[in-house]
């Protein structure tokens, strides 16, 4: 082989090594960036989940309170209806006797 061939081969090998080193650095930087991005997303999701839990607990508490108030209101209405029915039944004349 001629000297020019060896120089060309060494030049190509040097270029390949430089390219491999560059690609390794780029991949390492990308990996670091992705890890940081994933970590940030995890933190955001954890915060959002915690906020949503608090909001849901508050909503459940409000709904439970409203339901209790509605049940109490309906119970009062039923008591009133029951009392009116009883009052009407005591004021009605006795039913006529039926012949057999």
Image (cartoon, rainbow, N blue to C red):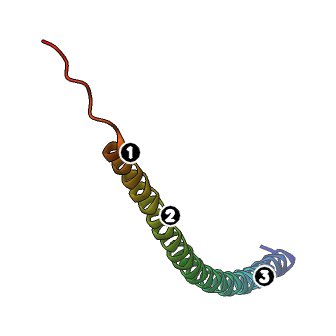
Q: Which residue is mark 1?
A: 88
Report the Cα–Cα distance between label 2 and label 3.
87 Å
Which mark's residue is nearer the viewer, 2 or 1?
1
Q: Considering the numbered disc 3 on the image, is that residue within a helix, a strand or a loop?
A: helix
- Sequence-earlier tag: 2 or 1: 2
Image quadrant in which you'd find residue 83: bottom left
User: Is 51 positioned to the left or the right of 100 in the image?
Assistant: right
Q: Position of residue 30 (x, y in %)?
A: 72, 81
State whether residue 72 is above or below residue 35. Answer: above
Mark 2 or mark 3, whichever is nearer to me: 2
Residue to which mark 2 is pinned: 70
32 or 27, nearer to the observer: 32
Name the residue located 78 percent from the left edge and 76 percent from the top edge: 9
- Where the C terminus falls, by quadrant? top left
Describe residue 21's horizontal placement relative to residue 7 as left or right.
left
Above or below residue 62? Residue 94 is: above
**Nearer to the camera, 19 or 23:** 23
Which residue is more in the foreground, 29 or 2? 29
Task: Identify residue for label 3.
Answer: 10
Q: Nearer the viewer, mark 3 or mark 1?
A: 1
- Along the polypeptide, which appears first: circle 2 or circle 3? 3
Q: Quadrant of the N terminus?
A: bottom right
Question: Answer yes or no: do the residues labelled 3 and 1 have beta carbons within 8 Å?
Answer: no
85 displayed left or right of 67? left
Under circle 1, the secondary element is helix
Nearer to the camera, 37 or 98: 98
Where residue 35 appears, as percent x and y from the top left, is 63, 84
Q: Residue furthest top?
A: 100
Specify which label sits upstream in the sequence, 3 or 1. Answer: 3
- Classify mark 2: residues with Cα within 10 Å, few (<14), some (14-19) or many (20+): few
Mark 3: few/some/many CA within 10 Å (<14, 14-19, 20+): few
Tell me the tag on residue 6.
Answer: none
């Amino acid at each position: 082989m001629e000297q020019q061939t060896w120089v060309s081969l060494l030049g190509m090998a040097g270029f390949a090594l430089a390219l491999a080193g560059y690609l390794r650095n780029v991949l390492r930087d990308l990996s670091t960036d992705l890890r940081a991005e994933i970590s940030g997303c995890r933190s955001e999701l954890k915060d959002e989940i915690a906020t949503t839990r608090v909001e849901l607990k508050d909503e459940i508490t409000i709904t439970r309170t409203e339901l209790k108030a509605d049940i109490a209101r309906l119970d009062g209405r039923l008591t009133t209806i029951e009392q009116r029915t009883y009052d009407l039944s005591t004021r009605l004349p006795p039913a006529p006797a039926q012949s057999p």
